[in-house]
Image (spheres, rainbow, N blue to C red):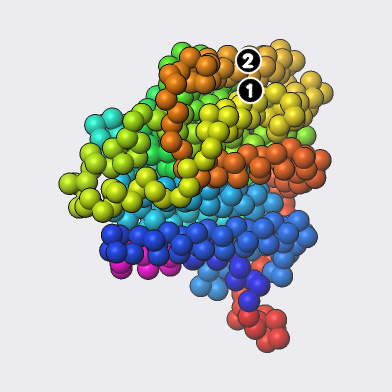
Amino acid sequence: MNEHLIIAPILIPFVTGALMLLYDDRQRREAKFWLSIVSAAAQLLIAVELVVRAKTGGDISDAEGISFYLLGDWAAPYGIVLVLDRLAAMMLVLTALLAIPSLVYAHAGWDRQGPHYYSLFQFLLMGLNGAFLTGDLFNLFVFFEILLAASYGLLLHGSGQLRVRAGMHYIAMNLAASLLFLIGVSLIYGVTGTLNMAHLANLVSAVSVEDRPLLHAGAAVLAVAFLVKAGSWPLSFWLPTAYMAAAAPVGAMFAIMTKVGVYAILRLSMLLFGETGGASAGFGASILIILGMATVLFGLLGVLSSQSLGRMAAHSVLISSGTVLGITGFALAGGGPAMLAGALYYLIGSVLATGALFLLIEPMNREDGGIAAMLALTADAYGLDSEDLDEVPDTGLAITATMTVLGICFALCVLMLAGLPPLPGFIGKLAMVQALIAQTALPAGLAWAFIALLVVSGFATLIGMARIGIQTFWAGDSVLPRVLALEIAPVVALLVVLALTSFKAEAMLRYTGGTAAALHDTVAYAYGVFATPRVADRPEEDAQP
């Protein structure tokens, strides 16, 4: 049974979301909430177990830290394979850690803005988990489309002119990216005859001189699709408005959606164009560095110029994505695993902090009426009655010392995103800076330019966020916002996890260091999947679940 645990993060949200579609929202909303919480908690527990397996090796692992699962019991590369390694397990835990607070926050009233909120949320989790686990390019496309389809509904959840307009831009951009995804996949398949990532890693060094330009073209087109999803400049103009317009718990989950594009670029770049890539080794490294730096620059300028916390949080997402993209380029160019370890640690902290910041946006800018007034605008469109609206303000307990609690939570988010000690933003940036200074594979000027951008982006975030904090907590009126415990508890939970990430920095850096080393060692991934025996081919005592 343990070997089937790898597919559980995909099956649990799929079954949960499908089951909730059978029941009416107005009659079963409370039951749907608890079912969603149980599902997300189960995913978190399973993800933690998979992290332990990734650190020590699993039952069907041919190499320490990497486990494989053959769907339909078809041997690779003919069948679909799920691959669990340290990076995939880390992203599964991060997704679940963000999902539970977002669900709790949504129960304060956001789930009442439209129908099937919890089902869409579960399908989003299914797509995220599947994208992190799949070992096949076409199924990566399938899971991308699942999570994007769910995100379309979640972004438009609640209607409103700004949300609809931003949603249309979001949908159009992602549909164009999906078309590029298919074109890139088709070109790669035409050259290699396979879409299995492990098989591609084995074949890329042996591609003929005549076919290699076509392979590079397919990889470049595929990279453009991933860069759109990662929010890389100049393909990120749609992102700030879309993320700002989303409902608060949806915006929190969107903080990790950009990292799916970053994950895909990191995974495929290291597999196909790493040290074992032959003549293709290092392909696209300089472009990733330049785009990463441009994205960080665009993000910091956006933070400085933004007049609202929502747009500022969206640009903070861009700074995070640009940082990891740039470090991916350095690692691909031969910079070594140390800087990538710092970038992965920084990624964890930035996702948690931006998620918490998105949850703080509405309470910090709440006008009279709160969620109930917002729901009244969409009551007719979604069939909500007066009883639905009347019960919203009493969902949970109102907290005391509202502005103090909000101010502390906001300050911790600022410390993390600005890269100030003692939170993971500082530790991760310090690890990256040390590795960049020590590396000799690239011109020192490029490394120092990236370091300068990291420092300047931190100062820009501090200045921009401080301005919003002063306007909110010092220059505001005397009317205190009514914030429910269901709204502030998820933020506190995310910040507690952030604090634990800082407290356990040494252990987590060891994990991310091992993850970075595994990404550089492509042989275990590339050849291990082909050594995974089918159930039908195993001895009878080993084939029993």
Relative to 542, 292 lies left or right? left
Is residue 45 rendered magenta in the image? no
Q: Residue at x 75, y 62 (%)?
A: 57
Q: Residue at x 66, y 42 (%)?
A: 496
Relative to 32, 191 lies left or right? right
Task: Find numbered disc 1 in the image and state the secondary structure of the residue it sits on.
Answer: helix
Let me know if residue 386 appears in the view: yes
Identify which amino acid the numbered label 1 is placed on.
Ala
Task: Find numbered disc 2 in the image and state the secondary structure of the residue it sits on.
Answer: helix
Above or below: residue 324 compared with residue 256? above
| Residue at the extreme bottom of the image, as rendered | 540
Instruction: Residue under label 2, please give it.
Output: 459
Q: Residue at x 52, y 33 (%)?
A: 402
Is most of the magenta stretch helix, strand or loop?
helix
Q: Residue at x 61, y 68 (%)?
A: 5
Above or below: residue 490 compared with residue 231? below
Viewer-side residue, 198 vs 363: 363
Residue 418, numbered label: 1
Q: Which quadrant of the figure has residue 297?
A: top right
Place of residue 532 in the rendered image (x, y in percent of width and height, measured from the top left): 66, 68
Identify which amino acid the numbered label 2 is placed on.
Phe
- Whole-number angstrom distance, CA of label 1 to CA of label 2: 6 Å
Callouts 1 and 2 close, C-beta under 8 Å = yes
Viewer-side residue, 302 vs 500: 500
Above or below: residue 336 compared with residue 194? above
Q: What segment is highlighted magenta in the picture?
A: 15-23
Quadrant including the N terminus: bottom right
Place of residue 514 in the rendered image (x, y in percent of width and height, measured from the top left): 77, 46
